[in-house]
Every structure is written in C-alpha cells, then in structure tokens.
Amino acid sequence: MLGNIPKAIDGLNAIILGKPVQIKLAMTCLLAKGHLLIEDLPGMGKTTLSHALAKVLGLEFQRIQFTSDLLPGDIIGSSIYRRSDESFVFHPGPIFSQVVLADEVNRATPKSQSALLEAMEEFQVTIDGKSRDLPKPFFVIATQNPFHQIGTYPLPESQLDRFLIRISLGYPSRSVERQLLTSQESKNLIEQLEPVMDGAELMKLQSKLDSVVVSERLLDYLQDLIDASRVNQNWSHGLSPRAGLSLLKAAKAWALLEAREHVIPEDIQAIWMSVTEHRLVSQSTANASSNQAVSDILKSVAIPR
C-alpha cells in the first residue's frame, strides 16, 4: 500500500536525527501534493532535510538562495535574444525542477517572493504571455528565518496560505546532539543515501489519496474545528475554505502513512497544528505566540465517537 515510503522515512531518520514527527509531516505534505515551509534558526538542519528528501525519493533537485537582490527572472527564467536567427530563446530557471528549495525565502523582496505564487498554486509559470508546465511531481520546500532577524521580509498571508504544512525542527536533545558531534557530516551522509523510489512511484502513491474514505461524522468534526476558529477572539479572521481543504488532504495523507484507507479523529489532530498555525493571524502582536491558542481549539471541540 505504501510502497517504499517506509524505507524513505527510515533513510531520512538516519540523517535528521531525533525528529521523526517532523519527517513524517514532511512526507505527509509531499503525499498530499502540498508545499512545505520550514521555519527555524540557521543551522538547525532545514537545508539538510530538503536535500535528503529529494535524494531518497529520486527526484530532481534545485536550490534557490533567496537574497535581497534576487529578481523574479532568477527564479522562473527568461527569454534571451539569439542573434543568429533573430529569435528569443527561453532559458528555464531553477523553478523547473521536481523539488525546489527556496532557501531563506523571507530574505528576498516581496516582488521576488511573489514569483513563487503561480508556480505553487497552478504548477505552471507564465512567461512572455505563454504558460509553461512545471515538472511532475512538483514540490516547493521553503525555509524561513525568524522574523526578528535582520534583513527579513515577512511573507504575506496570501503566500503563507500556499504552504500546506509548516514545521520547525528545533534544538536537538542532548543525546542526539552528541551523535551529531561524533558522526559523519550530514553532507557525506546525503551523498551515501540511495534513492528508494522515483517520481512515477510517488505520483502513484499521491493518487491513492482519492480513495481514502472520510465519514460524514469526520467531516462534521472537521467543520466544527473550522467554525471554532472563526468565532475565536484570538484571531483577526478564522480558517478559510481553502484551509479546510488543506486539513482534509493532510489528514488523508497522514492516514495513508498509517497504512489506513480511512480517516480517524487522531489523523486530524496529528496534522492540526502544522496546517493551521501559520494561517491564523493574531489580533495583536502581544498575542503573537499563539501555539497554545491554536491547540485550545482542538480541546474545545468534541471528538466524534
């Protein structure tokens, strides 16, 4: 049912030590055809996870380092005049890859950040009035530094909403950090990592999401959670219909990773925080630390039995 996904997860766990939940959420995002946002301090393993994910799944990989002088054409490509036949030839940018790492995405200007929007939503880009399809599968992993760091441009709500899941790796435990200090460098470990599948197999697994069953009672539960976010005074606005669809897709993918063909309440609870927290905007900066408030919504809604 899961093909080589368990092998892929084992390979990732051997490189990103002590973060099994985050790795499972990243795989959930990929199975649900979403895009992943990793927010953390520099040096926490964000880029390493992205490299390892592409390598173990056998997918083409491109990295874009977002900087303040990055231009949209540096991302999507541009047409260059060819004097020999007096024509313009399109040179594709790094966005034309199966896995694209947008590294430190909030260090680029909003104009460059917006160049990702159409690609992430439509799986195509429009250049010189012509639409060009992106490779399949197509997966964007963006890393983001905390907003308080110098030289960052906060992502607008419209762009945050394009990310199905947001995770944070955080500091390792003392025992895990000792392993990191005494083992090979992650770069060498990634080079030794063998692909366990390819893009065609991944797309076949992604198509299985349509057959995952969600009962009427589970849909009621999901809608109750969404409604609870809309009447909660902590937020300037509640979850949108698109956020509800994102929750449903992520819950189905999590159920699939649990080798089930139906969704249970625990699947929704497992992905709730990572799907919703970056979509809920606090009423005030004083309430910016909203982790507990998002978690409280789960506690306020009765679980179907």
Image (cartoon, helix red, strand yellow):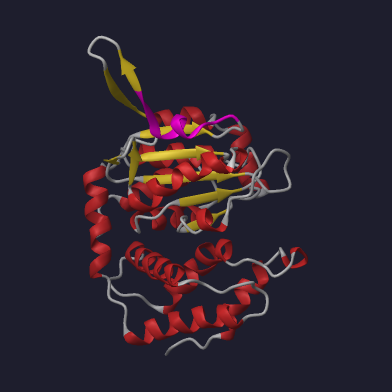
279 vs 23: above or below: below
Residue 285 drawn at (x, y percent): 75, 63
Residue 37 drawn at (x, y percent): 51, 50
164 vs 115: above or below: below
279 vs 88: above or below: below
**In the image shown, does 16 or 148 lie closer to the viewer?**
148
The answer to if 74 sits in the magenta stretch is: yes
37 vs 151: above or below: below
State the extent of the magenta-drawn residues as a range.
Answer: 69-79
Which quarter of the rendering shows the N terminus?
A: bottom left
Residue 31 drawn at (x, y percent): 34, 56
> Which residue shows up at 21% across the image and 45% down it?
200
> Which residue shows up at 41% across the image and 28% down it?
191
Residue 263 shown left or right of residue 291 in the figure? left
Res. 108 in view: yes
Residue 288 shown left or right of residue 61 in the figure? right
**In the image shown, does 241 or 302 lie closer to the viewer?**
241
Residue 92 drawn at (x, y percent): 34, 29
